[in-house]
Image (cartoon, rainbow, N blue to C red):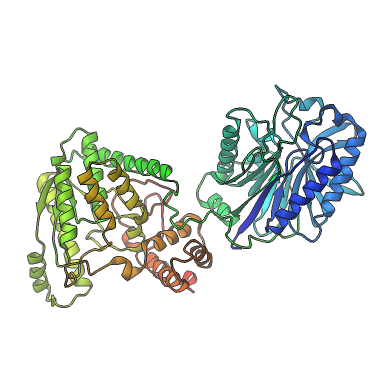
Amino acid sequence: MFGFYRLAAVVPELRVADVDFNLSKLAEGYEKAAKAGAAAVVFPELCITGYSCGDLFFQRRLLERAAEAAVEFAALTAGKGTVAVFGLPLLRGDALYNVAAVAQGGELRGLVPKTLLPNYREFYEKRHFRSGRGIVGESVAFGARSLPFGTDLLFDCGGGFQFAVEICEDLWGVLPPSSLLALGGARAIFNPSAGTELAAKAEYRRELVRQQSARCLAAYVLASAGVHESTTDVVFGGHALIADNGRLAAENRRFARKGSLLLADVDFDRLGAARLSESSFHDNPLPEGKRFRTIPLDRVEGSPDFAFAYNPPRPFVPGDVEHRRERCTEIFDIQCAGLAKRVEHTGAKKLVIGISGGLDSTLALLVASECCRLIGRPASDIVALTMPGFGTTGRTRGNAVKLCELLGVTLREVDIRPACLRHFEDIGHDPAKLDTAYENVQARERTQILMDIANEAGGMVVGTGDLSEIALGWSTYNGDHMSMYAVNCSIPKTLIRFLIETTAERSAPELAAVLRDVIDTPVSPELLPASADGSINQKTEELIGPYELHDFFLYHFIKYGAEPEKIRALAGAAFAGVYDEETIERTLQIFLRRFFQQQFKRSCIPDGPKVGTIALSPRGDWRMPSDASDAIWRS
């Protein structure tokens, strides 16, 4: 569904050298994975016999029964569609190979030999097996069929679902086979493994899987031998992992006595989009003469739902509290470092900021305050201007004043209403007409004041606009759209609240209270008169839709090129019970229309620091013509 495929890793119960018992457990695991809607499932290394058979691998009876069982297991896949990847010993001539078999549609479809054979400490594979290095373009007689055999196999199920296989130690090498297989087109790597458990080894294995999935811009699925392997000298833990482009998508609990089934829904279209636009992936050519054979398989079904997908409603905001604090601290540090460099370079004597009591200007002020501390300047070098207009409320103005006092910055107030009324008279505008001109006159008057005071003081204007506003063009052209350095320009609205909250957590109680009230204040430009009770009348999210929806759309549209139909489906799943279909659709149409129509504002935005993988600067991130049509996205 929309490029998502469900991947599975099964760690079955096992008896060492008891092929019939192992076959029955493989069948059970496969049946569970197939019923769960898995497109493919991987089992551990040598799971037909058990990895720890030792010199029993020299026994022909064991090898022959293993080969028979592989054919029998493959037959069980008939009519299911789900691909099975499992391990067995393969006798070819006078050489024995540790191989992964790929089965689908009732038949074996290919055999991949292990390349790197460990021969240290508890592993002595070279005693029993031969490396598959250099085996390309070959086939092997297996039962009544001839099967593709080699390390050059790519398996293609259509629909972007192309995968390859490497085995255990292959991943631990300096140059894992999966690196070249990914360059050859594999979007998923399956690894039948048999890793022993030692203190801290699982953590290292987890990082290997995660990092390799990131380097390869691929999914990586590993299933390792479980606790029923021989414990003569070592213990196997049955570790199973699924990673997706650097993210750990799923992990089982090790040392399970009854086996385990691990599932994750992975977006293969997203992997393709990342390879297309996000990295130097295609600048890594395959070695001269390196070729891969593509083995066509039957088409597999996409994920039946998003039950095992990573689809958070706030994709810019880490869900884990500690991770979120760490991320917010890092972003804040990036902002401060960017502003500090600009101040030092320009020799600015003052930092001039328009402070409204809203989220964006609060964060910009906090950044400026920390910047001054970093470069040894007094907080009084920050000139914060509160500029009440026709829509300013007591709550926002009060918070702005308190914030400036607590931070020790220089606070100035300029009432823009008289100047705006004079301007209305100059241009012949009826001030009772609350239209775009009415609003934008105020925004431009504020920017003019900021720029002029910065010139007068030998300073620079610190911009406050955020990524969400830039995406939607929710700013007045040459008004709040403009500054001399925009510290929030790549931070979405949904993340700004958490950045301020992180500062509040380490602030004195009085400052923390002000910051938290700012967080709770409705988002508003306050350009229309307040309500009769003095509260905010103009609420942005009532006009253009919830920012958390806009940020969700922005993330999927920009980062992965998701089509509107897919975005709708993902939003419907992520915001189930929060927003109905009508709200999601209406907000999506607003997002698409404004994103295209307002590109002209992004074509000339100020400098500012990039803090994440998504930014809309025309100088290094998003290049788009200002007059591009949105017709095919909104049709």
Apparent side of residue 454 relative to residue 5 in the rendered image (left or right) = left
x and y, in percent, of residue 522 in the image: 27, 62
For the view shown, which residue lies furthest in the front direction? 257
**On screen, 497 above or below 630?**
above
- Judging depth in this view, the residue of 590 and 121 nearest the camera is 121
Q: Quadrant of residue 46?
A: top right
Q: Is residue 173 visible?
A: yes
Q: Is residue 451 visible?
A: no
For the view shown, which residue lies furthest in the top direction? 121
Q: What residue is at 17 percent from the left and 67 percent from the top?
A: 391
**On screen, 565 above or below 47?**
below
x and y, in percent, of residue 576 in the image: 49, 65
Apparent side of residue 154 relative to residue 284 in the rendered image (left or right) = right
**On screen, 16 above or below 302?**
above
Q: What residue is at 62 percent from the left and 30 percent from the top?
A: 174
Q: What residue is at 41 percent from the left and 63 percent from the top?
A: 549
Apparent side of residue 590 relative to residue 111 in the rendered image (left or right) = left
Q: What residue is at 81 percent from the left and 28 percent from the top?
A: 54
Which quadrant of the figure contains the N terminus?
bottom right
x and y, in percent, of residue 512 in the image: 24, 46
Q: Quadrant of residue 226?
A: top right
x and y, in percent, of residue 195 in the image: 68, 33
- Judging depth in this view, the residue of 75 and 108 nearest the camera is 75
- Judging depth in this view, the residue of 207 and 600 nearest the camera is 207
**How many numbered callouts?**
0
